[in-house]
Amino acid sequence: MVSCVNLKNRSNYKLGFGNLFKSKDYYFLCITPHCDCLRPSKINNEFYFIHGKEIKIETALKGAETGDYTFCIIEGRPLSIEWICKPFSSYISDEDNVKIEKTISFRNESYPLEYICTLKENYAQRISNNSFGYGYRIGVDLPNLKG
């Protein structure tokens, strides 16, 4: 796998930073910091996620240096995901957090999560930084300057 660590056979199913899930047409990435994943009561069990969609690998490769993409090989098939770096939170109870089956709420709809893999730390951290930085842009999106 390119940017993923395969933990399919793990015995601890608690949410963790960098966990990648699939549900319906979306992919979801947990961007909740490690310390909060260990003690969810600190965040009232409101875990942070971003969502993304599968994108053609050719398109993702062209924008890999400037965009927010994940590249994985899942069940022998290359997968590229383009992330929408606008974080949202979803409540997951302590009881549900230890189960393999989890469901999150996104845009007033429930999404059952299927664990795919965990992103390597440096990839997840870059995407997380971009996501949490979204709120600091004070309503101004800077134009892309191309030289």
Image: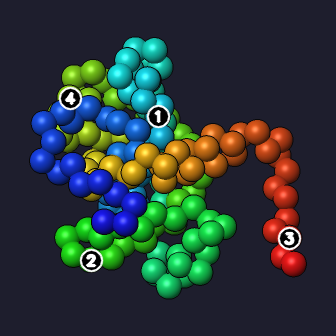
Quick one: label 4 or label 2, which is nearer the N terminus? 2
Q: CA distance from mark 1 to mark 4?
A: 16 Å
Q: Is residue 6 visible?
A: yes
Query: Which three-letter amino acid code belongs to the residue tagged 2?
Result: Arg
Q: Which mark is residue 42?
A: none
Mark 3 vs 4, N-terminal side: 4
Earlier residue among tags 2 and 3 = 2
Report how far apart the C-alphas of labels 2 and 3 lie in the structure. Answer: 35 Å
Q: Position of residue 85 (x, y in %)?
A: 59, 52
Residue at the (48%, 40%) spot, across then down = 31
- Secondary structure of the residue carrying numbered label 3: loop
Query: Residue 22: percent from the left, percent from the top?
Result: 32, 57
Q: Residues within 10 Å of mark 2 (few under 14, many from 20)?
A: few
Which residue is denoted by mark 3 in the rendering?
Answer: 145
Residue 18: x percent and y percent? 40, 45
The numbered mark at residue 98 is 4
> Among all residues in the image, which is located at the extreme bottom?
58
Residue 72: quarter of image: bottom left
Q: Secondary structure at mark 1?
A: loop
The three-letter code of the residue at mark 3 reads: Leu
Q: Earlier in the sequence, mark 1 or mark 3?
A: 1
